[in-house]
Image (cartoon, rainbow, N blue to C red):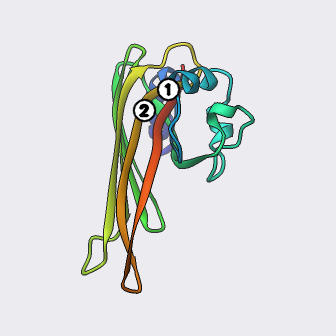
Amino acid sequence: MRIPLLLAAVSFLTPLAAHAGRLDIAVMQFTDPRDPTAMAQALNGVDLAQITDSDRTETNVPALRGGYVVFTQTLAVSPGGKFASTTRLTNQRADVSGSLNGSRLSVSIRILEGVKIGLRKFRESLYTGSASVAGGVPQLISVAQRIGKTQTAIKGRATIVSYNYTTIIAARYTP
């Protein structure tokens, strides 16, 4: 008696799933300044899912070597629609939301590390970007270059540490 209902539900969902495409998205961070043009050209010749299969970028392409993979995910996304996803791993939570209008992707990735309960500290990072993902090859969605100094204290001794890093969002949409 439940089989016809189940078959009706499957046949209702099949047309929706047939129109959904695959969106691979990754946030990568490099510990030095990088040229956005060189990185965009380098992304055209790599498989985004393959180079982000580890904590560090795995590639022989010089413009993408030596990066840290902050976040990566694959989503089913329909063109002309909005999407959202929440992922939790140990003590990190990642909220991904965005929209795909035609070939234009807008995405926001919020990563929360730690716990908001009691005296424990937490850190929130927000990555946003918007760009075209036409062509079925990885595209550079956003680039952020940060230069600065921060003070750290170890056993009562304060030191100033300089930082200079580049953070990118890359995505590939396959219809």
Residue for badge 1: 36
Residue type at mark 1?
Pro
- In the image, taking residue 30 as reference, residue 131 lies left or right, namely left
Q: Earlier in the sequence, mark 2 or mark 1?
A: 1
- Taking the spot 42% from the left edge, 24% from the top edge, the residue there is 78
Is residue 97 in sight in this rendering? Answer: yes
Indicate the secondary structure of the residue bearing disc 1: helix
- In the image, taking residue 167 as reference, residue 97 lies left or right, namely left
Asked if the residue at tag 1 contacts the one at tag 2, i.e. Cβ–Cβ closer than 8 Å, the answer is: yes
Could you tell me how far apart the alpha carbons at marks 2 and 1 are, in whole angstroms? 7 Å
Looking at the rendering, which quadrant does residue 172 occupy? top right
- The label shown at residue 98 is none
Residue 47: x, y in percent?
67, 30
- Taking the spot 42% from the left edge, 15% from the top edge, the residue there is 103
Residue for badge 2: 143
Residue 100: x, y in percent?
37, 23
